[in-house]
């Protein structure tokens, strides 16, 4: 359906833009990842609670909602040419969306809790945050295997179906493999960077293709 493809294109563009917003926000505005000491990290959260709360809504909760739309739009586009692969990929898109929503909500709820606790007992707040952050990292930060599987399957299905530009599909395959490899601890950091930067290009390019309409016009 044309309307679903347009919605999917908008969702893909949002997904790419959210990555850029996250990088700018967390590197240039509040560099929370640059703080190692847990007490200082909670103190930084307390000083920037509203900003951080909104950021995690944008790049986790809302992002995951758009991922559902994009996953369904891609399934609709690819089901005729590669039904089984498209179905499998869509399952992983839904799993990924659930995981990312859970990660964002856990982070924001946990952040509010430790900020309240920080006024009474900074050391205890830091200890509680370490536990919350471990759960958050396991769901949405320490590796990108679920997203990698989805992008790899979608790219494979698009190649088989003759949909989307071939170079975009090859790029998606590389990004997907990088996401899967990020589960290996010694390789995680470098491959997460490759995956994240590649995803920005992939999402924006995919969004433009879907908004333009037919594969031939997009190419």
Image (cartoon, grey):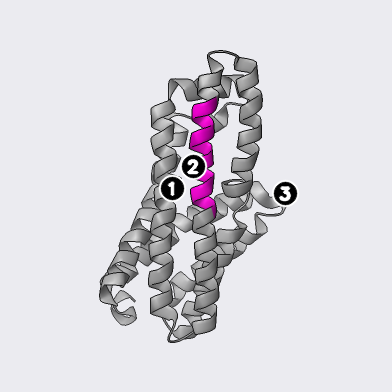
* Discs 2, 1 touching: Cβ within 8 Å: yes
Residue placed under numbered mark 2 in the picture: 105
Q: Residues within 10 Å of mark 3 (few under 14, many from 20)?
A: few
Mark 2 / mark 1, whichever is N-terminal: 1
Instruction: Write the start and end of the magenta stretch as one range.
Output: 99-113
Q: Position of residue 149 (x, y in %)?
A: 58, 65
Tell me the CA gap for discs 2 and 1.
Answer: 7 Å
Q: Earlier in the sequence, mark 1 or mark 3?
A: 1
Could you say where residue 151 lies in the image, as x and y percent from the top left? 52, 66
Between the residue at mark 1 and the residue at mark 3, the CA separation in whole angstroms equals 26 Å
Q: Nearer the viewer, mark 2 or mark 3?
A: 2
Q: Which residue sits at x=26%, y=75%?
A: 2
Percent position (x, y) of residue 11? Answer: 35, 60
For the residues labelled 2 and 3, the Cα–Cα distance comes to: 26 Å
Prevalent SS, magenta region? helix
Residue for point 38% across, 36% down: 54
For disc 3, the marked residue is 185
Residue at 47% across / 57% down in the picture? 199
Q: Looking at the image, can residue 156 be seen?
A: no
Viewer-proximal residue among 79 and 173:
79
Q: Quadrant of residue 130?
A: top right
Residue matched to label 1: 61
First in sequence, mark 2 or 3: give its number: 2
Residue 101 spot, x, y in % from top left? 48, 49
The answer to whether residue 106 is magenta is yes
Q: Are marks 2 and 3 in contact (CB under 8 Å)?
A: no
- Figure check: 91 above or below 214: above
């Amino acid at each position: 359906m044309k309307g679903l493809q347009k919605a999917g294109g908008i969702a893909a563009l949002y997904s790419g833009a959210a990555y850029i917003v996250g990088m700018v926000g967390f590197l240039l505005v509040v560099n929370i990842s640059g703080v190692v000491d847990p007490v200082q990290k909670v103190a930084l959260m307390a000083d920037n609670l509203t900003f951080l709360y909104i950021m995690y809504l944008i790049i986790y909760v809302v992002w995951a909602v758009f991922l559902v739309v994009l996953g369904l739009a891609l399934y609709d586009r690819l089901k005729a040419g590669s039904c089984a692969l498209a179905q499998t990929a869509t399952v992983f898109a839904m799993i990924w969306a659930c995981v990312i929503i859970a990660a964002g909500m856990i982070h924001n709820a946990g952040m509010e809790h430790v900020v309240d606790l920080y006024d009474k007992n900074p050391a205890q707040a830091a200890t509680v945050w370490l536990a919350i952050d471990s759960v958050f990292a396991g769901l949405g930060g320490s590796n990108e295997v679920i997203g990698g599987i989805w992008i790899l399957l979608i790219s494979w299905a698009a190649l088989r179906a003759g949909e989307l530009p071939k170079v975009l599909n090859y790029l998606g395959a590389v990004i997907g493999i990088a996401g899967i490899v990020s589960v290996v601890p010694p390789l995680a950091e470098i491959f997460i960077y490759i995956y994240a930067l590649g995803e920005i290009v992939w999402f924006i390019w995919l969004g433009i293709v879907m908004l333009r309409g037919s594969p031939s016009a997009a190419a």
